[in-house]
């Protein structure tokens, strides 16, 4: 019997896969990540995509809100990665998003770890979360892309530093087309991680990461650190080199690029 306390998708579609074989569509949820976690074992398992037309309580990194008006792409992917691949998966998840933006004509990049930016304005973001169900670790990778949102609906401080796909290319892209193109790259990414043929992926990330080589200030739980983005490690940490040539690995932080 249907459990009324669980989010109810408007539709459930089968997909060709090979990994992502099921797509749950919602009109509105609080957060597709939260819906994925609630639905683990109840219709959202490994290889499920959840997508919503809007979110009433979308979540960003570091406890921030992700304002989610209609017109944007809001989705979560459910996977059951090897524990050793969890950190790098969260990092590399930015690659398919950027590839899809490139395909549609926006030369976006990744501000470490995976803020999707174009000309220093944010166009998308990723929130990866881990959750255990029946002793199995699941990763929920939440992706938000400002495809066709009305930027006026964002709070002023967010709007000043945001952009959307429609504004950058002057036309509206169908969210389903965007999703399908991006999912082709996700299938490839996850397959390569699984089959151990993902050696080049970190280099792909480096090529797309605009923080490497930039002057940065990073706010970390231990305080602020200034220097130059030097590299990312295989575990996804950012290496910052200060003026004295000292290198520090940052696992968690918010990066600002110097103007
Ligand atoms: C960030 O840059 O702070 C991450 C933003 C992640 C937003 C997406 S939208 C779909 C998924 N559901 C959420 O609540 N958050 C992510």
Image (cartoon, rainbow, N blue to C red):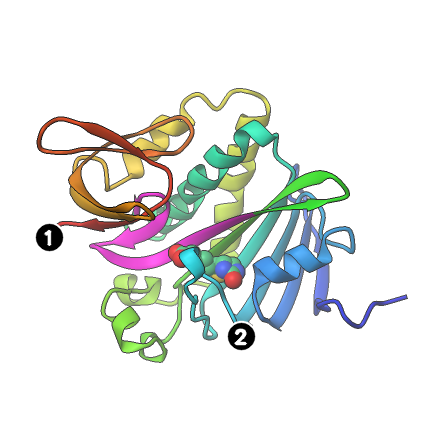
From the viewer's perspective, is residue 193 above or below residue 20?
Answer: above
Determine if the magenta segment contains residue 118: yes
Say few, some or many: other residues with alpha carbon within 10 Å of mark 1 (under 14 / 14 to 19 / 20 or more).
few
Report the front residue among 222 and 146.
Answer: 222
Residue at image coords 59%, 31%? 83
Left or right relative to 65: residue 184: right
Q: Quadrant of the N terminus?
A: bottom right
**Residue that lies at the very extreme toward the bottom in this rendered image:** 152
Residue numbers of the magenta segment: 110-129
Residue that numbered label 1 is attached to: 259
Real-space CA distance between mark 2 and mark 1, rounded to the nearest whole angstrom: 34 Å
Q: Nearer the viewer, residue 216 or 208?
A: 216
Residue 165 — which label? none
Mark closest to the chain's N terminus, 2 or 1: 2
> x and y percent of residue 245 in the render?
13, 26
Picture coordinates of residue 14 (x, y %)?
A: 72, 51
Query: Compared with residue 2, is residue 195 higher up or lower down, i.e. above or below?
Result: above
| Residue occupied by mark 2 | 56
């Amino acid at each position: 019997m249907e459990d009324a306390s669980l989010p109810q998708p408007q539709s459930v579609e089968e997909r060709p896969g090979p990994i992502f074989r099921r797509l749950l569509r919602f009109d509105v949820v609080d957060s597709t990540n939260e819906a994925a976690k609630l639905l683990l074992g109840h219709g959202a398992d490994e290889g499920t995509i959840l997508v919503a037309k809007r979110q009433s309580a979308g979540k960003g990194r570091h406890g921030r809100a992700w304002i989610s008006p209609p017109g944007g792409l809001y989705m979560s992917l459910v996977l059951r990665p090897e524990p050793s691949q969890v950190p790098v998966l969260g990092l590399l998840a930015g690659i398919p998003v950027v590839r899809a933006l490139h395909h549609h004509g926006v030369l976006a990049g990744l501000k470490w770890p995976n803020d999707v930016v174009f000309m220093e304005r944010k166009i998308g973001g990723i929130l990866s979360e881990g959750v255990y169900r029946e002793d199995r670790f699941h990763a929920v990778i939440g992706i938000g892309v400002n495809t066709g949102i009305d930027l006026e609906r964002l709070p002023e401080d967010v709007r000043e530093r945001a952009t959307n796909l429609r504004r950058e290319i002057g036309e509206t892209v169908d969210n389903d087309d965007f999703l399908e193109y991006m999912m082709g790259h996700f299938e490839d990414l996850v397959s390569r991680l699984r089959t151990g043929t993902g050696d080049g992926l970190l280099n792909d990330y480096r090529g797309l990461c605009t923080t490497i080589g930039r002057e940065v200030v990073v706010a970390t739980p231990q305080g602020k650190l200034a220097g130059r983005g030097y590299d990312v490690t295989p575990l996804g940490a950012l290496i910052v080199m200060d003026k004295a040539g000292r290198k520090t690995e940052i696992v968690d932080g918010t990066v600002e690029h110097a103007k």
